[in-house]
Image (tube, coloured by chain):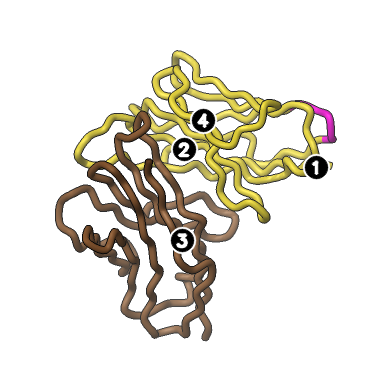
Amino acid sequence: AQSVTQLDSHVSVSEGTPVLLRCNYSSSYSPSLFWYVQHPNKGLQLLLKYTSAATLVKGINGFEAEFKKSETSFHLTKPSAHMSDAAEYFCVVSDIGGGFKTIFGAGTRLFVKA
Amino acid sequence: DSGVTQTPKHLITATGQRVTLRCSPRSGDLSVYWYQQSLDQGLQFLIQYYNGEERAKGNILERFSAQQFPDLHSELNLSSLELGDSALYFCASSVGRADPSGNTIYFGEGSWLTVV
């Protein structure tokens, strides 16, 4: 069965400093991995996805994530945080196990200080 | 705009009542998902339908039910409502096939339900 663990429930950074949001997953198949962002009172928006092509995936708004199979990780990074990045971020794993299930992580709340 | 449409956007109702939330998936998407998001429990997967049939079930209460119609729109029915059912309910859709491009899920803006 698939599972996904977001290692931090809250992350706080200063504007202009790097962002690292950590995600570990487990999957018995070749998974697809996603990061979604949710701004307050909004729906979830896809940031980026990995689907067995290049292991370094670039997304919107300067975010990127690296798929590391040996570490079963898919951490989300951004070189320089902006105030508008303050939001909740969800790591998601999807594979064909169990009739094609998609599992969401618990979310990481990113705070950006001026 | 994700292409997923949910109605109503906001709903206030009393305990014990029943409500129906409606969702139109993106054009061409066969899978519809329902999620509940509350402050204390975060984002909870409720149920998934694929082309009219139930595909996966999550933490959905027996008081809740859903269906997907032949035109692929979906409804989530919430009955005997309790104060704790107050939450943001998301509908999402995807192509629904295990294709190499990955099964991206697109979310609607959500329906805010307040039970008083």
Q: Answer few, some or many: residues within 10 Å of disc 3's Cα (few below 14, many 20 plus, some between 14 and 19).
A: many
Measured in 3D between alpha carbons, the distance from the residue under mark 2 to the one under mark 1, in whole angstroms, is: 24 Å
Q: Earlier in the sequence, mark 2 or mark 1?
A: 1
Q: Answer few, some or many: residues within 10 Å of disc 1's Cα (few below 14, many 20 plus, some between 14 and 19).
A: few
Q: Is residue A1 left or right of residue B75?
A: left
Residue under pointer 4: B57
Measured in 3D between alpha carbons, the distance from the residue under mark 3 to the one under mark 1, in whole angstroms, is: 27 Å
Asked if the residues shown at circle 2 and circle 1 are in contact, with their CB atoms under 8 angstroms apart, the answer is no
What's drawn in magenta, residue-wise? B14-18
Which chain, by letter, is yellow?
A: B
Badge 3 element = strand
Residue at x 46% of width, y 54% of height: A105
Main secondary structure along the magenta-highlighted residues: loop
Q: Is residue A24 left or right of residue A51?
A: right
Q: Which mark is residue B83?
A: 1
- What amino acid type should be assigned to the residue bearing mark 3? Tyr
Q: Is residue A36 visible?
A: no
Q: Chain of mark 4?
A: B
- What amino acid type should be assigned to the residue bearing mark 1? Leu
- Residue B15 lies in the magenta-colored region: yes
Badge 2 element = strand
Q: Which mark is residue B92?
A: 2
